[in-house]
Image (tube, grey):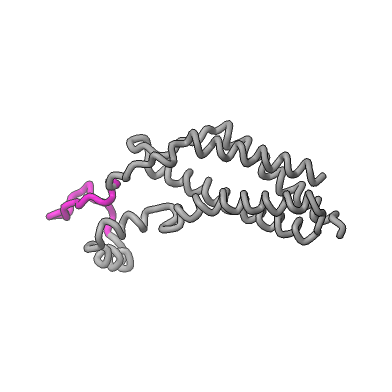
Amino acid sequence: MAITVLVLWLLTASAGARLLLTSGLGRRAVPSPSPSLKRVPEPVAASASSPAPLSKREARRAARRRYDPPTLTRARNEPLPGLKDLVEFAHPAFAITGLAFWLGYTMVHNRVLAWIAFGLVAATASLGLTWFTANLRAARRRGEDEAGPVFATRLIAIHGSAAALTVALAALTALTARG
């Protein structure tokens, strides 16, 4: 069973590497300011087509944020403010480290190595789901006008399915491990 999980883990890693290579993530350009960062002149007089008045709380927030620098506004609008790059690094790093521990378990059948590898694969799956959700939200916000990383749907499905099966089989193997 340990060898099956190892082969499945390698399949997941190869699909993930293919995703990274074909996505254009490394060739990411500096994003242009979003339309929400452009200064909009304040209305002189209210017209019939103006939106409903803001509540007191919303008015206070708008007054506080009026002079925020564009970098702060952009950071607030990011799907994972300040953490997106960390997730992009940590997901593959945890996967590779977990694979190394699973390889160690496969060779010596030490139960501790199996549980460490299972913990790492579970953390890797959580980080992968976070990364996927953040990219999905960013694509929806970005719309059609800006280019971003493009992930092939088929590869995402293969990578996610293989990862889910890897987590399940690693848990089952760690539970039945002896030694």
Q: Which residues are magenta?
A: 34-53
Judge by depth and name the residue closer to the eye, 107 or 126: 107
Number of marks present in the image shown:
0
Residue 65 location, quadrant: bottom left
Name the residue at 67% across, 49% down: 99
Residue 70 at what x, y percent from top left? 26, 56
* Residue sitting farthest toward the left: 44
**Is 1 displayed left or right of 17 in the figure?**
right
Quadrant occupied by the C terminus: bottom right
Q: What is the quadrant of the N terminus in the image?
A: top right
Instruction: Place residue 3 in its image quadrant.
Output: top right
Q: Position of residue 121 (x, y in %)?
A: 66, 52
**Residue at the spot 29% in from the left edge and 57% down from the top edge:** 71
Seen from the viewer's position, the closer of residues 130 and 112 is 112
Instruction: Give the prevailing secondary structure in the magenta stretch.
Output: loop
Spot occupied by residue 31 in the image (x, y as percentages of width and height): 32, 45
Residue located 24% across and 65% down the image:
63
Residue 131 inside the magenta-drawn segment: no
The vertical placement of 89 against 165, above or below, is below
